[in-house]
Image (tube, grey):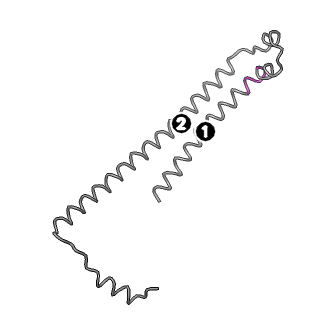
Amino acid sequence: MINDNQLDNMLRDYNPETGNGRDIIADLERRMDAVDMVKEYQERQMAQLRMRAKIAFAAGMVMGCVLMIIAYLLPSPIEIITVTTGSPVLNGLIENIHYILGSMCIMLMMYGGYEITQAREYMNQKNS
């Protein structure tokens, strides 16, 4: 293990070649420009992530509402289909079509909310 005196001696003896002062400044400016470019790229990605989350939530809400409205406006085809089909599985699906579509609406809305929470967690993680 290195003690403080040895570390001080190593740092005191370290004398890097600096060359021309202008080269160092130009290199530093290039690196700073690269850092700025990366920061701008990350900000654009965060803005896109926020927009995607908002779109997913809005699409889930709109599709959920539309499917719910359609589900309740559809006539109940149970009498017609039970006469023509003998399949109990198909009859069960048709009898419960309103509940199936309602469940799909709820799942779409939950997915939109999930995407928003994931985006917020990602943004909080990047900011800290």
Tell which of 41 and 73 is nearer to you: 41
Q: Would you place residue 119 above or below residue 76 in this image? A: below
Q: Is residue 80 left or right of residue 71?
A: right
Q: Amino acid at mark 2?
A: Ala
**Residue 95 in magenta?**
yes
Q: Residue 56: which disc? A: 2
Q: Secondary structure at mark 1?
A: helix
Quadrant for residue 90, please give it: top right
Tell which of 65 and 116 is nearer to you: 116
**Residue 98 in magenta?**
yes
Q: Amino acid at mark 1?
A: Tyr
The local crowd at label 2, few if under 14, some if 14 to 19, many if 20 or more residues have their Cα within 10 Å, is many
- Residue picked out by circle 1: 111
Q: Is residue 94 left or right of residue 128?
A: right
Tell which of 85 and 82 is nearer to you: 85
The residue range painted magenta reads 94-99
The local crowd at label 1, few if under 14, some if 14 to 19, many if 20 or more residues have their Cα within 10 Å, is some
- Residue 107, position in %: x, y? 65, 35
